[in-house]
Amino acid sequence: MDPRFLRTFVTVARLGSFSAAARELGYTQSAVSQHIGVLEADLGAPLLTRRPVEPTEAGARLLEHAEPILLRLDAARADVAKVAGGPPRSLRIGTTPLACGHAASLVAPALTVTVRVADRVTIAREVATGVLDVGFVDGVAAVNDPLRLPELGLTVAEVWEEPLAVAVPADHPLIARTVPGIARPSSFSRSTDESRRSRPAVRLEDLVDARWIDAPVVCAPLDELAAIARADGFRPALHYDGADVSGLLALVAAGHGLALLPRRVVTHGLALAEPALTHRTELLRLGG
């Protein structure tokens, strides 16, 4: 199976057009049609309907395999180029919004440094394909469990874990019932035992019907929270497409919904009684 033909197939399926795929790939439309024809003959099954242009059942199954295969090929090319290129003169760092503090530790005056902020899947893919040299990604996970990322052959070079809190408005009923000072940011620096005594704790499954803000670039997507809690719910009251943590906290403070975030960034929050979860940050590199 020729990777060129596989890439052509994925592009046609994504764009829903032979002519649009030809323009993007720099081929003629007849060449694109030829690529698809050779691939269909090789596999012995039609992969695309022509009007409209969309994957057949066999084509949909091939897509599931094709995109990871092409990504791994790009990763292999990037890994070889990295070895052959000699010592780096620049550093391209990718980071999710809540991992920026870790990314700052790699900035070196001797190098030309670029820092890109994006969601964790984008960062992982761009490290795998050599667009970025390293990536810092974060998310919610069970203690000592890895983050959920595509299988890209990346190395997790370093890991940090920290407590989580459900960010709530200052007038939230559970905050109002707790001891004075619970809402102060400094309370997050207390010892674990003291924090547990002074901070109200909730079970994640008890909040499935609460109003939540879906902010997948900043924190765990709500469908991921539902999977972690093994419960239906976590329906968004509001979608936040930004990468600005302060903007998300402002929406929480205004009463538009809850968000699960690291304790260090939460002013008013509820501790999690269960499940036992952590905010995990991983440093990703290509190869060893």
Image (cartoon, rainbow, N blue to C red):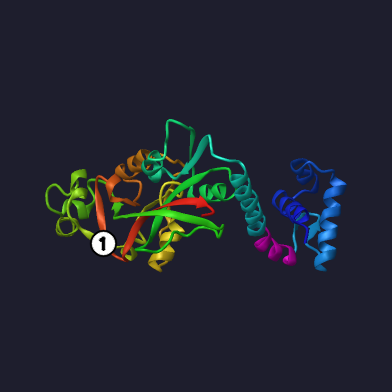
Q: Nearer the viewer, residue 85 or 79?
A: 85
The range drawn in magenta is 57-66
Please report the residue visible at 35 percent of the width from the left and 39 percent of the height from the top. 246
Q: Is residue 6 left or right of residue 268?
A: right
Residue 44 lies left or right of residue 191; in this view the side is right
Q: Which residue is mark 1?
A: 202
The location of residue 143, given as percent across then percent down, is: 34, 63
At horizontal 65% and vertical 57% (from top left) the residue drawn is 67
Residue nearest the viewer, comparing 129 with 241: 129
> Whole-percent x and y of residue 3?
74, 56
Based on the displayed image, in which of its 4 quarters is residue 39 positioned? bottom right
Q: Locate residue 196, reporting x and y percent.
A: 18, 59
Residue 70 is left or right of residue 206, and the answer is right
Name the amino acid, label 1. Answer: Val
The local secondary structure at tag 1 comes to strand
Report if residue 195 is visible in the image. yes
Determine the residue located farthest toward the left in the rendered image: 180
Q: Is residue 64 magenta?
A: yes
Q: Is residue 272 above or below residue 117?
A: below
Q: Main secondary structure of the magenta part?
A: helix
Q: Relative to residue 273, is residue 79 depicted above or below?
A: above
